[in-house]
Amino acid sequence: MLHRKRGRASFRGAGHKPLPDKEVRAFGEVLASRRQIVGMLTAERNLLGTATSESVKKRIEAHVRWLERELERIEGDLDEAIKGSRAWRESEALLRSVPGVGLVLARTLLAELPSWAHSTENAWPPWLASLP
């Protein structure tokens, strides 16, 4: 679970030590990189639809393939980070148990909203109760 102590966010599950802020920041950086890659893929695919030159289309297609491979590697890095921490696995599972919260949203919440944690373990954050 996410917890806040002395203004510093950390992850912790039942009976686990908090993860170092360095690991939390690194996870957030990888997630931000994923977000950028997804944005670039969207832009390149849109550009591909309007390109008329065959040579330009080939370059765009090659870039799209590279971006897709990079996205796979980034998602693998995120998977490894989650698998490597029981606290993150438990937190992700708890978030994903909410209807409508999928893999990407759960990981975004873990990385971007660490302030939702409270001192009681396995507690739902108060703002989560307001979701439909």
Image: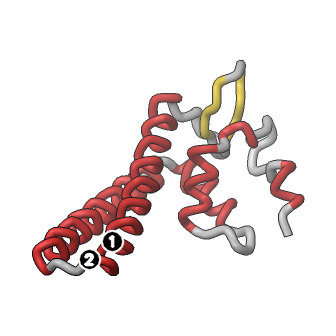
> Could you say where residue 16 lies in the image, as x and y percent from the top left?
59, 39
Horizontal side of 127 relative to 104 (left or right) equals right
Mark 1 vs 2: CB contact within 8 A: yes
Mark 2 closeness class: few <14, some 14–19, many ≥20 residues within 10 Å? some
> Total label count?
2
Residue at the location (68% across, 60% down)? 95
Image-quadrant location for residue 72:
bottom left
Helix, strand or loop at label 2? It is loop
Which image quadrant for residue 90? bottom right
Q: Residue furthest left?
A: 55
Q: Please report the residue visible at 72 percent of the width from the left and 37 percent of the height from the top.
A: 115
Kindly identify which residue carries mark 1. Answer: 47
Which mark identifies residue 51?
Answer: 2
**Alpha carbons under labels 1 and 2: distance apart:** 6 Å
* Amino acid type for the residue under numbered disc 2: Ala
Q: Which quadrant: the C terminus?
A: bottom right
Q: Residue furthest front?
A: 52
Is 24 placed above or below 1 here?
A: above
- Residue 18 screen position, x and y as percent: 58, 33
Q: Quadrant of the N terminus?
A: top right
Q: Residue at x 70, y 35 (%)?
A: 3
**In the image, is residue 6 above or below residue 29?**
above
Residue 79 on image: x %, y % = 41, 59
Image vertical order of residue 58 relative to residue 110, above or below: below
* Quarter location, residue 48: bottom left
Amino acid at pointer 1: Leu
Can you say whether 32 is above or below 37 in the image?
above
Depth check: 119 or 32 in front? 32
* Kind of element beneath mark 1: helix
Seen in the image, is 30 located left or right of residue 106? left
Local crowd size for mark 1, using a 10 Å CA cut-off: few (<14), some (14–19), many (≥20): some
As drawn, is 23 to the left or to the right of 90? left
